[in-house]
Image (cartoon, coloured by chain):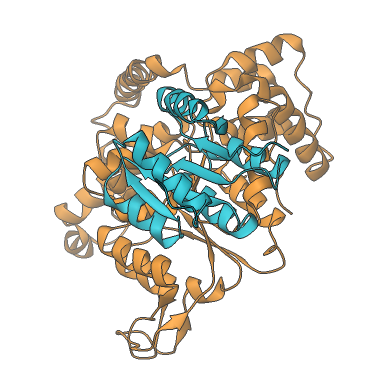
Amino acid sequence: MTTPLIGVSKSILKIKELINHVANTCLNVLITGETGVGKEVVAQNLYAESSRSSKSFVKINCAALPETLLESELYGYEKGAFTGAHKKRPGKFQTADKGVLFLDEIGDMPMPLQSKMLHVLQSGEFSPLGSDQEFKTDVWVIAATNHNLEESMRKKIFREDLFYRLNIIKIEIPPLRERKEDIPSLIEYYFRLYQSEYPDNLGTRPDSDILAKLCNYSWPGNVRQLQNCIKKQMILKSWEKIFEELPKEHPEIVSQFTDDSQQNGSSHYTKSGFQSDRTRIISEFVDLSTSSDKLFEDISLKKIKKLASDKVEKEVITFVLEKVGWNRSRASKILKISYKTLLYKMNEFKVHPPVK
Amino acid sequence: MSGKNKLLIVDDNDDIRSTFYEFFNSLGYEVKTAGDGLTALKLLKDKPNFFDCLITDLVMPNISGLGLIAIVKKEFPDIKIIAMTGYGDHPGALASEVKADSVFFKPVELINIENKVSELINPNNDKQ
């Protein structure tokens, strides 16, 4: 089922009108907006209203895969194209033929793949890896990104020609804090949805005070964050707890959580008696219950260092992401690492946003 | 029905819109304007057989000039199209690809555009 586009704000009404006017043109669409605003929902609504709705909607996340894998996912490969290519596999351009190809996070697509993408958009032709045959494809390309592509073009990390080819129809979804009037209808929608999904859980609809509080919050993680809160409320059955768990408003985020971590850190060290807890800490990374010969063999400072730092990194990344409502671009700034590195680490440590 | 030629000018820049409006209006054209592609498309759908010529910028919010040209070519094939661009080669090349009848690069001379408009609308009338 397609999630409807919920909202009464001017910008959402305008987007609905735009979808209505362009869904049957099959012109390339670029959807922009912060993480969690509902870019995929807009893409699905375009698809549902188009004449292609009986064909497939194929999605690919351009940020989630390393370059070579992304290439083979998009274009497919012939048997023997590379080590491990035991049999021929069709790419997304082929499976989406006559339907929609949704390129999520297009702003993270590596440059070499951008050129190849441009070629397909220009000619409608592509060849799978390891094949010299060109295939025709008829896909409606809908791309989305949370990056400012104009800025990326200035930095020379996004091709200008590709931008203009995608930007035929531009749908900009404003963050939730700029369309607070949509919040009540979103709450009502998700409340009903989760009520039907979990009929045993008796969450309560917000009263007018709580609603006002919810409307005044800045929602850095946008609709997705709001949605998660409503879901959580179904289980916690307390709006107060929900408010306690919400990250503080934007400018305070950094100072607030550095304070927290320092406090937690120091209390942890004094309470547990850092020195006496030595074996407990070590046993997290090495099995201490074996013979000392075996143990000395197992102990490698390099290996333990990696395990320990991975563990801490994972916790810190999850902590920050939760604080900013899973807005990855904001989290990467706070963590002072690149957006790409963050995605790579999230993938490596299997850090995923809570399931919708 | 008046015998005036009817133009639709589309540009997200207010100054350009009003300059074009004044200029073509003073020359006896009936002119409507729109600040983005969606507004233009709605005007076109409201009056399907009204406009003779569309003059559009390329880089605009919501429906870009390129999108507008593609839609007009398909749905209103009789309307002549002039594209204007100020953003270098890429949108310009794309405008020819979607078959604008003519492409101008900004800054444009209004008189040149007027010549092109009358040439496109009345191809058999030699201008004196």
Residue A108 seen in this snapshot: no
- Nearest the viewer among A90 and A151 is A151
Quadrant in which the N terminus of chain A appears = bottom right
Q: Position of residue A204 (x, y in %)?
A: 79, 24
Furthest toward the top, the residue is A209
Q: Position of residue B19 (x, y in %)?
A: 42, 24
Quadrant in which the C terminus of chain A appears = top right
Image-based side of A244 in relation to B91, left or right: right
Image-based side of A93 in relation to A355, left or right: left
Q: Residue at x 46, y 83 (%)?
A: A89
- Nearest the viewer among A132 and B121 is B121
Q: Residue at x 26, y 58 (%)?
A: A111
Q: Please, is residue A81 above or below residue A290 in the view?
A: below
Q: Residue at x 31, y 24 (%)?
A: A265
- Nearest the viewer among A293 and B84 is B84
Image-based side of A265 in relation to A16, left or right: left
Q: Count numbered badges in the picture.
A: 0
Q: Colour of chain B?
A: cyan
Residue A78 seen in this snapshot: yes
Q: Which corner quadrant of the image does residue B47 belong to?
A: top right
Furthest toward the front, the residue is B128
Q: Please, is residue A205 above or below residue B71 in the view?
A: above
- Nearest the viewer among A3 and A132 is A132
Q: Please, is residue A285 above or below residue A195 in the view?
A: below
Image-based side of A193 in relation to A143, left or right: right
Q: Position of residue A28 (x, y in %)?
A: 50, 56
Q: Position of residue A160 (x, y in %)?
A: 29, 50
Q: Residue at x 49, y 32 (%)?
A: A325
Q: Colour of chain A?
A: orange
